[in-house]
Structures are given as C-alpha cells and as structure tokens.
C-alpha cells in the first residue's frame, strides 16, 4: 500500500490511489521526535497566523483611539454602544423600546440583545464605569479578539474536515481576507463577527459529532452544535440562514449516506435548534419593554426551525420502510423533503393567511423576514452594488474551490462535512451577491474550500512527476499572490472614510451635547425628549449616542416605524417651500437641524432634482447648507424660521474644505415697521463666528400705502451662547427714492423663539 491519510471516520485510505500516484513500499513511520517537532511547528505556524490576524485588525487603532476619547467608526456601532452602556448601568437589561429613536413616537428596537449583553458582561467583569470611555475601549478591542476567534474556528473546521494542512491554509486566508477583516476591525462594535464566530464553532462541533465513534459523545457534540446555532438567533435573527444550512447539509448527507452517525447527528443537532428557537420566541413574545431584553423573533423563524428538525426524522421513517435499492431510496427521500418544504412554503402560510388575514404568502413572508431580521433571506435579491470589489481576492481560487468541494461531495470516498462546506459556499456566494456586508459570511467557507483544494493539488503534485509538481506550485504561488497580496491595500480605504466622516462631524455633535439646550436625560430610554434634531437619516445613531439628542430618523430601516422617520427626513430636506419644512418641524417637535456637506447631493437627488447643478436647485437642503439660510426655496430672500447657530469647518481627505452647519428652528420675531410712507424697507443683521466667514442677513419688503411693513426674522441681536451671534443691533432702512429713514432695533431671543411682535417706528 502507498502512503495514507486520516479519513473523516478514523479509517485509513490509500493516498496514492486517490491522487493518481504509483504504489510502492510502505514508508516507515516517523520517529517520535520528528512527530513532536512537526506538532510544535504546526502550533507555531498557527500562533503566527493568529498574531498576524490580530495585527491586521488593529491597524486602525490610531484612527479609533485619540487620547482619552474613542472615535468609533460606523453607524450601527454607536447604537450597539448605547445599549451596551445602558446594560452596564442597568445590570444587564436591554430595553425593547427607545423614545429617543424616531421621535416623537419612539420606536421598537428589533436587534436581539445577545451581542450587547455579552459585551456588557465583559465590561462589568472588568470594572468599567457605565457611560464612560472605558466601556468604549473594552468593546473596541473585543472586536478584533472575536475576529481572531473566527480565524481559530476556521482552523478547527479545516482540521476536522481535511486535516491540519487545510486548517492552516484556511486560517491564513481568513486572517487576510478583506471581507473578514472589515467586520472585525478594532472599534467596529457590530454583531456580524459574533454571528459568524458562533456559526463556525457550531459547524466545528457538528463535524466532531460526525467523527465520533461512540454514540453518546456524538449526540453530545451534535446537541451542543444545535444549541449554539439556535442561540445564534439571539445575536442576529438572520442567523436562521445557518440553521437552514445545517438542515440542508444534514438532509443531503442522509440522502446519500444513510448511516447511524448521520442520523444521530442530524436528529440531535436540529432538535436542539428547534427547542432553543422555540424558547427564544417564547421569551420574545413575553418580553416586557424596558425591563427585559427583547429578541424580536417571529413565527417565520420558528416554522423554519421546526421544519429543519422534522426533515431528518421524516427521512429516517422513509428510509426505514423504503426499498433498499439506492434509486428508490433517493426518490422517496427527495419526494418527502419536497413535500415537507412545499407545505412549509405554501400550505402553512395559507393557513396563516386565513387565520391572520395576511394578504399573500409571498408578501407575508417577505414582510416578516424583512421587518424582523432587518437583513437576511428577504434581502437576497436587492442588495448593494459593488460586491465584486469585495470578492476580487477569490478570482483565482473560487472556481477551483467550488469544483473541488462539489467533486469531493459526490465521490464514493467522500468525507464527513463535504456537503456542509459545499452548501455553505453556495449560500455564502448568494448572500454576498445580495448585500456586500454578507461577503464576510462567505469568507470562511471560501477559505476552507480554497485551502482544501490547494492541499489536494499539492498532494497530487507530490504523487506525480517533478515537472507537474513544479507547475502546480507555480500556479498556487500566482494564485496566492493574486488572492492575498493584491487586496491588502484595498480594505483600509474602506474603513478610514467612515472614521473621517465622524471626525468631521464630531465638533457639531459635541456642540449639540455640551452647548445646546438639553432635551432631557438621553440615558433614560423611556423618557420622552423635549425636542428632537432633524438630520439625514444616516446620522441618527450618532445624534443619539454621541450628541445626546433625539433623532427623527436613524439607520435601522426595514420596518414601518423606522421607514416613517426616513420618509420624514426626506420630506423635510426635499421640501420646495420653507412653509412645508416649518410645518413638519412644528409637528415633530424639531428644534435643531444638522446639515453636513456630504449628503446634500443625495438629498437633492431624492427630491427629484439634478444634483449636478446644486446651486441652481431649489429645496430646503440647498437653502440651508449651500446658501446658509440666505436663500429660500420658493422666493428671493432669506429663510424666516431657520437661523444658523453653529458652523464647523473641516476638510475632506483630499484637502478640500468641508463644512457642517447647525440650524435652529424658530417661529421668528414678527417685526412691524411703521414708515413715513410707501417705500422699500430692509432689515440687516451681521452674524459673526470665530471659525467661519461672517454672515450678512438681510430681509427686505415694501411698505403699504399707510407705511406699514411686516417681516419675519429668525435672528436675535443679544449676546447669546451660540457660536453664531449678532455683531450688533439690527439696522432698519426705509427709502422711497427721495427720502430715507434709519433706525437700530434690538431683537430679544425670546421674541425670536416665540414669534412675539416687535414694533419699529421710523417717523
């Protein structure tokens, strides 16, 4: 016999026969010292890979940690931190509703609490004070540690699947893959990396169950994997994808190999998933807002979980009574699965529609999926463009990997886990094509597939002649250069702009938190704020966490209550008249408007205007930011209800100036001017700011025949604590061509905010 390798079941298989080599004498077993050094080298390489993975995920530390402050990149990360800070202060309680999100109504928070509670427990155990930068620092460093955990779990799966070589190669690829790095960078406090880690560890436990000889350890490993897969729904509702993957892999394996190993593993795995999912759904249904953590799972998750548990049971019954010939068994097993999932996808929703009044199954399923998971199966068909840039690293290895895992899965000498990796790769590709952030889900199975195919090619070359070995090694070297070296400089520019954008807007957020009037205690999720801040919906989490202000719209999306805030934000910035915007602010209790430069072209485009000629477009977004409130959308003249209160200059990464402006909504003082006769009247106020160019406000009108003119003015002339304030009293000038009258007028801030009347007599 030729050389041998370990099989998934523990038996020995001829290596030369598999790879095409010639038979020869059996080599002597390596000496114990040699085995020891090989083992030490293996662990040293693994430690080097883990250290390199942590180093790559920590390169952004200089952008995140700025002295005593922490600049957390991203948007969802800030709301995770808000909930973590609350959980640290409230002894592990995460509210189900937040009155400071989508004000004035507030909104339910459909994120599960597992990720936030886990980091909160870490902060409490390490002595971090609530609502402090210590919590932010601990959470920021926990993310690259979880990323290193994904690398280690990938090595574990690869080692169980095809041996130590595959494990090391797969771990090395995940350590440098841009999509895996992007979700586990230091400071990116989001649940993606935790969900991927839990799923990878669960699949490793499942492979352990398939490899176990004794029935009791096999069942224990499978049940542990099922508990972890079910509990992963507490981290991310979209983790139902991993449950479906486990069910599909188990059913496919049972259709091909009906063995006691597979039956035990599938039954205990999927039964544990269903039990945990049922418990989580029950906890979600009985959750009391503001007192216990909220899960926001739906019947959709429960139906799919129970269907996955029933699948192997149904196959067991079919195989027990079906003929022993392969063709009838496959036909009967496939028909049973088609019947089961047909009932799940059509009959069950039909009954649900009859009982609950749903409009249609497709609509109900899509609504439930999108509204409860936020991102998951319902978003596969409408993802973000540009995913190809995230997958360029796999151009050399993806076809080979896909062919390898499929070819290995259909061979008679297939291994445990071949179908799992193959289906994982297919689902990962579908998810990545649906939305770019899901490319991280693809990173692990793709690395395993590429690693397995490379190890197979290397062993094939070792069993062949030296020329073929040299050609294969050269091909692998070129693929490695394309797959690893090229994208190393591609992922960093994607993370730095998020941190830069927050740094550019951070002074405005700090001003809203420290200098602006307080809307209330933002740490109290149930306290209704006294007023809110209108902004582009992408900045909602920044306003709530970094500025302590209530937002009108936030980046949750995908549910009607959050979509309402997004529609209101678009309606405000796209309004064609100031009256429409003022009415919306009055209705929603808005006091401040945050207007950075970056979203202005998008807001103009959403208003149905041409963003290529911004200054010629008339809407509230351009009136506020481009004209600084000196040009109303519907007329030639300044805005009457919005005043510039703060302006913060910054710069784009290219060096071009970048400005963030903060406006305050007011009723505007009603200035009644009594002039000697009919003529033209103007009211001028010079507004100064130490860090911005001066603003010359000028409102104009014409007196009636009896010499009366009314103007609405949003600026006062008092020395206020605002950054932008009047340099002196207002100057009122009346002219009729032959005569002229002038006066100075003091406008109190109280009159501006309440709309009080101020009279000016020019006689």
Image (tube, grey):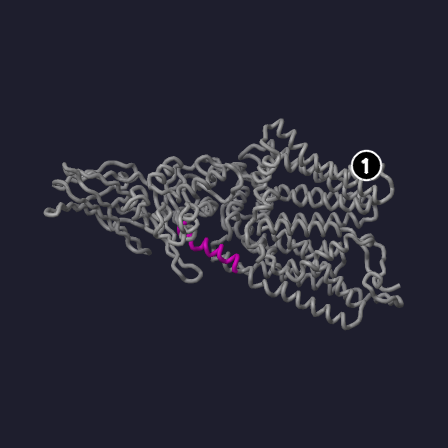
The residue range painted magenta reads 493-508
- At 69% from the left and 43% from the top, the residue drawn is 244
Task: Check the image and report above or below for 561 versus 743.
Answer: above
Along the line of sight, which residue is nearer the eye, 283 or 15?
15
Along the line of sight, which residue is nearer the eye, 394 or 508?
394
Question: Could you tell whether 425 is left or right of 25 in the image?
Answer: left
| Numbered marks: total | 1
- Quick check: is 149 in the magenta stretch? no
Q: Residue 272, position in %: x, y?
A: 72, 39
Task: Check the image and report above or below for 292 versus 217.
Answer: above
Outermost bottom residue: 467
Q: Residue 614, position in %: x, y?
A: 37, 52
Task: Check the image and report above or below for 251 versus 481.
Answer: above
Q: Residue 248, position in %: x, y?
A: 72, 44
Question: Could you tell whether 491 is left or right of 264 in the image?
Answer: left
**Element under label 1?**
helix
Which quadrant: the N terminus?
Answer: bottom right
Q: Residue 444, position in %: x, y?
A: 66, 54
């Amino acid at each position: 016999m030729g050389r041998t390798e370990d099989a998934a079941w523990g038996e020995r298989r001829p290596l030369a026969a598999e790879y095409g080599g010639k038979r020869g004498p059996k080599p002597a077993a390596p000496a114990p010292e040699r085995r020891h050094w090989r083992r030490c080298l293996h662990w040293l390489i693994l430690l080097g890979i883990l250290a390199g993975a942590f180093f790559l995920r920590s390169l952004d530390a200089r952008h995140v940690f700025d002295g005593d402050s922490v600049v957390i990149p991203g948007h969802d990360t800030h709301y995770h931190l808000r909930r973590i800070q609350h959980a640290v202060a409230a002894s592990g309680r995460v509210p189900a509703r937040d009155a400071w999100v989508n004000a004035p109504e507030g909104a339910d928070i459909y994120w599960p609490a597992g990720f936030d509670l886990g980091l909160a427990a870490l902060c409490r155990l390490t002595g971090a004070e609530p609502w402090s930068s210590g919590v932010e620092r601990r959470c920021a460093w926990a993310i690259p540690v979880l990323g290193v955990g994904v690398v280690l779990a990938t090595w574990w799966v690869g080692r169980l699947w095809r041996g130590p070589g595959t494990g090391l190669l797969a771990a090395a690829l995940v350590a440098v893959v841009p999509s895996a790095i992007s979700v586990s960078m230091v400071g990116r406090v989001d649940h993606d990396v935790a969900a991927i880690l839990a799923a990878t560890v669960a699949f490793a436990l499942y492979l352990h169950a398939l490899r176990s000889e004794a029935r009791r350890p096999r069942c224990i490993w499978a049940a542990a994997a099922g508990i972890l897969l079910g509990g992963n729904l507490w981290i991310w509702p979209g983790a139902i994808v991993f449950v479906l993957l486990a069910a599909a892999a188990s059913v496919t394996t049972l259709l091909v190999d009906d063995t006691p190993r597979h039956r035990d593993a599938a039954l205990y795995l999927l039964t544990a998933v269903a039990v945990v999912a049922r418990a989580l759904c029950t906890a979600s249904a009985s959750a009391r807002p503001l007192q216990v953590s909220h899960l926001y799972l739906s019947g959709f998750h429960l139906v799919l979980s129970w269907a996955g548990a029933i699948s192997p049971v149904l196959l067991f019954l079919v195989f027990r009574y079906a003929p022993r010939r392969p063709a009838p068994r496959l036909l009967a097993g496939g028909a049973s699965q088609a019947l089961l999932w047909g009932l799940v996808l059509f009959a069950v929703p039909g009954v649900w529609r009859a009982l609950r009044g749903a409009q249609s199954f497709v609509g109900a399923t899509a609504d439930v999926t999108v509204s409860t998971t936020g991102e998951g199966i319902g978003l596969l068909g409408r993802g973000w463009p540009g995913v190809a840039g995230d997958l360029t690293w796999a151009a050399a290895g993806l076809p080979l990997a896909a062919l390898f895992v499929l070819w290995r899965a259909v061979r008679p000498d297939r291994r445990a886990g071949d179908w799992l990796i193959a289906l994982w790769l297919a689902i990962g590709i579908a998810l990545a094509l649906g939305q770019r952030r899901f490319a991280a889900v693809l990173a692990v199975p793709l690395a395993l597939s590429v690693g397995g195919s490379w190890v197979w090619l290397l062993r094939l070359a070792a069993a062949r002649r030296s020329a073929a070995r040299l050609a294969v090694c050269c091909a692998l070297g070129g693929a490695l250069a394309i797959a690893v070296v090229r994208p190393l400089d591609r992922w960093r520019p994607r993370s730095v702009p998020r941190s830069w954008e927050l740094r550019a807007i951070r002074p405005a957020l700090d001003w809203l938190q420290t200098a602006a009037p307080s809307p209330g205690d933002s740490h109290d999720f149930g306290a209704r704020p006294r007023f809110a801040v209108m902004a582009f919906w992408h900045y909602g989490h920044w306003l709530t966490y970094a500025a302590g202000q209530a937002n009108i719209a936030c980046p949750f999306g995908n549910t009607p209550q959050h979509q309402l805030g997004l529609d209101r934000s678009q309606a405000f910035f796209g309004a064609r008249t100031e009256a429409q915007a003022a009415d919306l602010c009055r209705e929603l209790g808005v006091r401040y408007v945050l207007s950075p430069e970056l979203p202005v072209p998008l807001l103009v485009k959403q208003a149905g205007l041409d963003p290529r000629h911004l200054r010629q477009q008339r809407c509230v977004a351009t009136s506020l930011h481009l004209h600084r409130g000196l040009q109303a959308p519907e007329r030639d003249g300044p805005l009457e209800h919005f005043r510039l209160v703060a302006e913060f200059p910054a710069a784009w990464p290219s060096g071009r100036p970048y400005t963030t402006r903060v406006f305050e909504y007011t009723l505007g003082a009603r200035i009644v001017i009594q002039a000697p006769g009919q003529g033209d009247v103007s009211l001028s106020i010079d507004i100064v700011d130490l860090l911005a160019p001066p603003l010359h406000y000028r409102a104009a009108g014409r007196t009636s025949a009896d010499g009366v003119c009314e103007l609405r003015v949003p600026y006062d002339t008092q020395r206020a604590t605002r950054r932008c304030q009047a340099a002196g009293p207002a100057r009122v000038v009346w002219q009729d061509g032959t005569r002229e009258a002038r006066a100075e007028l003091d406008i109190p801030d109280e009159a501006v905010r309440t709309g009080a009347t101020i009279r000016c007599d020019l006689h």
